[in-house]
Image: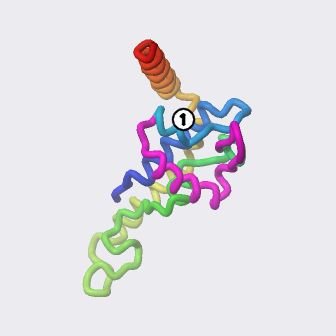
Amino acid sequence: MRLTTKGRYAVTAMIDLTLHAQNKPISLADISSRQSISLSYLEQLFSRLRQSGLVASVRGPGGGYHLAMPSERIFVAQIINAVNESIDTTSCRGKGDCQGGEICLTHNLWQDLSERIHNFLSAISLADLVAKKDIQQIAQRQVEQLLTLDDNLRAGAC
């Protein structure tokens, strides 16, 4: 299994959105600043997340994104699936043609692992993640770093 940046960034961005969307939409630029993820990459990811019904967009001034349902109902596996990421540990992408068109000796082992990973990630909601103390501390640190950077930029502009 190889979870690429697409899946990792999508989960990270959705956690950020959950943490910061207090009854107002959050801009992708804000998520980009806090998480150091390219704005254009976030736009691609959020297009897929919106199509999957996990987020909704608000247009106009003060617009952005918010969760399309409660964070308790959005699970990590859904986010990864929404951005077309695979949680498949088989070398044949689950097709069973690993060895010259036939199942290899370890196919069922890797297939079982894929199912366990998917089940594990299907049991973790965004609400579960944002309730973790370490995630809240990291989010607070990120906000403080941005505020310090903003203060430094303003002081230099005067």
Instruction: Residue under label 1, please give it.
Output: 30
Where, quadrant-wise, is the C terminus in this rendering?
A: top left
Where, quadrant-wise, is the N terminus in this rendering?
A: bottom left
Q: Is residue 37 magenta?
A: yes
Q: Which amino acid does label 1 sit on?
A: Asp
The image shows residue 117, relative to residue 151, as above or below, that is below
The image shows residue 156, relative to residue 25, as above or below, that is above
Question: What scheme was used to colour the molecule?
Answer: rainbow
Q: Residue furthest front?
A: 158
Q: Does the magenta stretch include residue 133?
A: no
Q: Position of residue 34 (x, y in %)?
A: 47, 32
Which span is picked out in magenta?
35-64
Residue at image position (68%, 49%) is: 57
Q: Which residue lies furthest to the bottom in this view?
A: 101
10 lies left or right of 21 = left
Residue at image position (26%, 86%) is: 100
Residue at image position (47%, 34%) is: 33
Q: Position of residue 76 (x, y in %)?
A: 53, 48
- Judge by depth and name the residue closer to the eye, 115 or 40: 40
Residue at image position (51%, 56%) is: 44
- The answer to which image quadrant residue 97 occupies is bottom left
- The answer to which image quadrant residue 87 occupies is bottom left
Secondary structure of the residue carrying tag 1 is: helix
51 lies left or right of 91 = right
Q: Position of residue 14 (x, y in %)?
A: 56, 43
- Judge by depth and name the residue closer to the eye, 31 or 55: 31
38 lies left or right of 126 = left
The image shows residue 135, relative to residue 144, as above or below, that is below
Q: Position of residue 137 (x, y in %)?
A: 48, 21
